[in-house]
Amino acid sequence: MAVQTARRAEKLPGGRVNLAGRGSALGDRAFQGIAFAFAASILVLIVTIFVVLFVDARVALAQEGLRFITGQVWNPNESIFGALPYIYGTIFTSLIGLLIATPIAVGASLYIVEYAPNWLRAPISFIVELLAVIPSVIYGFWGLAVLAPFLRDRVERPLKAALGDVPVLNALVEGPARGRDMFVAGVILSIMILPTIMSVAREVISTVPGTQREGMLALGATKWEMIKGAVLPYARGGIVGAAILGLGRAIGETMAVTMLIGNSSTKISWSLLTPGYTMASAIANQFADANSAVHFSAIIGVAVVLLFVTGAVNLVARLIVSRFGGDTRATGI
Amino acid sequence: MGLMTLLLAFTFVLTACGGGATPTTGGTTSSAAPSAAPSTAASTAPSAAPSTVASAAPSTAASAAPSTAAGGSATRTTAPATTTSAAGGTSSTATRAVATATRTGSATAVGTAGSANATPNTSINITGPFSGEANTLNGAGATFPQVLYSKWFDEYSKVTNVKVNYQGTGSGAGKNAIRDQTVDFAGSDSPMSDAELAAAQAKCGDTIQHIPTTLGAIVVSYNLPNVSQKLKMDGDVIAGIFLEQIKKWNDPKIAALNPGVNLPNEDIITVHRSDSSGTTDNFTSYLTAVSQAWANGPKSGSTVQWPGGIGASGNPGVANEIKNNPYAIGYVELAFAKQNNLSYADVKNSAGQFVTANAASVTAAGQSAAERAPADLRFKLVNAPGAQSYPITAITWILVCPKQTDQAKAVALTRMLWWATHSGQQFAEGLDYSPLPPAIVVRAEAFINNITVNGQKAFPGR
Amino acid sequence: MQGQMTAPSIPGARPRLSLEASDGQARRRKIVNGIMTTLIGAAALLGVSILGIILGYIIVKGAPALNLDFFTKAPPALGEAGGGVAPAIRGSLLIVGLASLVGIPVGLGAGIYLAEFGRGRFADTVRFIADLMTGLPSIAIGAVAWALLVKRGIGTYNAIAGSVALAIIMIPIITRTTEEILKLVPNNLREASLALGTPRWKTIVSVVLPVARSGILTGVILSVARVSGETAPLLLTVLGNSFASNNLRGPMAALPLEIYQYATKSPFADSFTKAWGASLVLIIIIGLLSLSVRLAARLGGPQARR
């Protein structure tokens, strides 16, 4: 890694010095022009995306104003569009996913970096990261066929039985155990963001200098104490960045969530068993259905909000991760 | 490497397709068609034949004003087609009491669209490809008739080589698609509102036509693992369940209607449509008609504010959820319940009878259809009168723009519509739908004949 | 990266352990250590086994669905048995193929620009935007493709709109990986070539790119694999088709759509079997693509980091 940075540093100054004769200037300019055009097309794309979405979202945003993100009622029949239930569903499921995935990702990363024999490190990383290659729709189907019935019968029902009569906590399990709710969507999200978080967390943890560890061990610390005292504090920032990066992925996830979240209530409820919506699943469900201009515009408005939220979360994550020595490139996949 | 393979495959597919596409368009009425067609037509005729009389004397049958055009074009019918229809006509006797009853009644004209007693034109049969028609049609919308449509278009591609691609996106999406003209036709079992029709004027240039295709029952289907008896339900109970006021299966209100049934003490999991749906529209129209609580609450519409439950996309999606979730209850077209061995309740109708949904009870509900139907055929059948009528019966339409612009598509579309409303009807009962009442078919004929392409009549009459 | 390593302070690295621990304390420390070690191991095991479980289901349940018909026939009428997913396989190849035709050159070009010419505010902006775009929800991109090419543009549901959406997803991925790979190419190669009087464009084409070949290919293939499974944008744009179609300007079937349909929109007896089968086919396609990445990596040269 040190080498890589060094190269990058020395390459840029040397970059565009044209040592060739004048004859080739035309070819160079043409080549650079073409490459420039392709690079510029990325800017054109992002501008197009935003312009198209904003133009289509204008009507609803103008009608609702700030209520679009603070309003709790989404009723197309009466042309009221408050997207808060969708925003809430997005945050709720993403947090469930994050709460489950982060400890597992950090644990697996610690295992790979601190415990695993050399020959096992690459295979474990590879296998976990392969999870990122499985398409969302297959997660959704597997969730529908295997995970949801399992969670419904083995987790939700017992949980409901255990917490149903406990004051305060029973709000978490209000409603029947359906297997189509925030909880199931959150669990499938946790699996889907696991590789994202793990690859960055592993990177960050492996950058903890060996001297840190040796110092702790030399003081007679157990391995866990060494991890707790030297590794985790050092990697903490990067792990937070990794988690936020995972959050970014969870927020925009569409298919698997749509297939499992229940697509129903627009109530804002603390219950894990609420069949709800996320922003993405609301778009998927209502995109083709919106029969008034305002309703369609409101759906696109949700897409605009979603775009801003994922953009902001990704931005924050990347800033944190790069500050703490991780690498976010792996997550592009 | 993988990329190379992919690109190679890509080019290969492209070339393969380019070559393969030509012969299909070339197909005409000649060679292969008659051999394939008569067999289907003959086998289909007996059950289809809404009118035995008409086949004997097509021209007289078509005396009603809108049918003249169809009658006139009958002269152009090809020889094989005529023989088939004659064969079908003679072999089929009046099998269904309802059809016969309607036909024997006195001829009273209803509205301007047609006469209640008119008999469909059976002299025109679509039996093979037609020179110059498009070889693909794209449609989207209602899932209520999807089992039937899926069968239809599978059969139809064998009859005519025209591939009719129909995607069940829900009635709401279908109505939007025909408004935007992103499809050639749409399916819907929720009629377009005046506002929707006005919005659709922009791209179509005329009023979208509602061509009825079939009748069906919306059943209240449930998954109760250890209950073998058929449950009985009335409007209040159904509304209570979907309002989530009745929360447990052993609720006294359900038990009162079902003495002797060992109802479990389990939470009821309601399943409803997450997409904009004509099935929802009919179901909630029924609930609005029979339950005050519902009329004061969610009311009727393609989308309503459900108090809770699982949202699923399409009739198949709801059936899927019912099938996979014990203690679930939802509403689907009869075919989806029956063909998946889902239980469904007998529902109390306006005459106070508990009626099982089946072709007979749906036909009974549809019996009054012709009399009640307005000229544009935008109407609902829920809560129909009659002791035998199933109360949550619905009619479904194919929505088309009557001002077509593409000659080949218009020919293919009108031929497909004619086939669907005539030969296609025979498949209805076998798939748990009910065929259209003959008087409605006559009015559909008028609609089909009124479709124009660039000012000319689009339907070639064969 | 290494440069930043020494920069941040080391907040938690203050050893506060009492070295004169009592026996009881020592035992407790040992127990805690044991528990945590177990938990960490369990986390790793869980992470690894999830993939095994998911793939296991797909293979065991999907394999029985695979037969010749599955690959060669169109789906039957709803509720009827038999048939296959041939239109979907063909549709996926067409849609992803077209997306690649557009997305790969643009992504490569932009990546080359950023690595070889990219300095200043413009390049930084492009880099930043490309990073941001890799995180955009694909459904939003699908909505844009629908607005531009379905509602406006072509006017009907069509495969091109789907391809464009997929291409938009591919471009930033390829751009960023290409740039990263090209940066790994030793600069003295460029200098040597330029010193010989080779024009810069020729240096890039015949010296830099060949060295980075396998790495670039890796990025390209991974992006193809990624979009092969994309469903949401296709749902909004290509509609689906129960027949095989080669008309890019019309609705088309695609494997991910087929899986979605069979999984959620078909209660009939064998629909889950078909969904498992289609999942297996899709996983095999993606697996082969990913595997070829490994092979490409073996070809040597700077490689993409996963």
Image (cartoon, coloured by chain):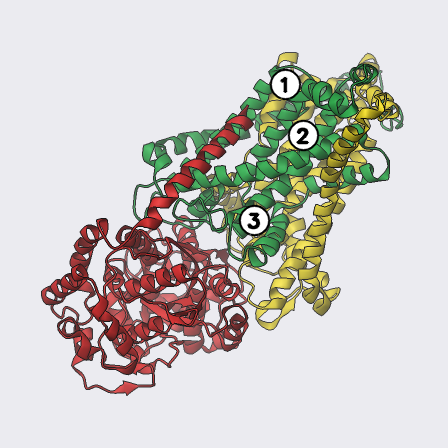
Chain colours: A yellow, B red, C green
Residue toward you, A84 or C257: C257
Residue A216 located left or right of residue C261:
right
Q: Secondary structure at mark 1?
A: helix
Q: Residue at x 36, y 62 (%)?
A: B411
Q: Marks 3/2: CA distance? A: 34 Å
Tell me where residue C238 appears, x and y as whole percent.
Answer: 51, 49
Residue A152 located left or right of residue A206:
left
Specify the label residue A122 is tagged with.
1
Tell me where residue C68 appears, x and y as whole percent.
Answer: 33, 32
Residue toward you, A92 or C12: A92
Specify the label residue C161 is tagged with.
3
Q: Marks 1/2: CA distance? A: 13 Å
Chain ID, mark 2: A
Total numbered badges shown on the rendered structure: 3
Q: Which residue is mark 2?
A: A198
Q: Amino acid at mark 1?
A: Ala
Tell me where residue C156 appears, x and y as whole percent.
Answer: 51, 56
Residue B104 visible? The answer is yes
Q: Secondary structure at mark 3?
A: helix
Residue toward you, B139 or C140: B139
Residue C77 located left or right of residue B313:
left
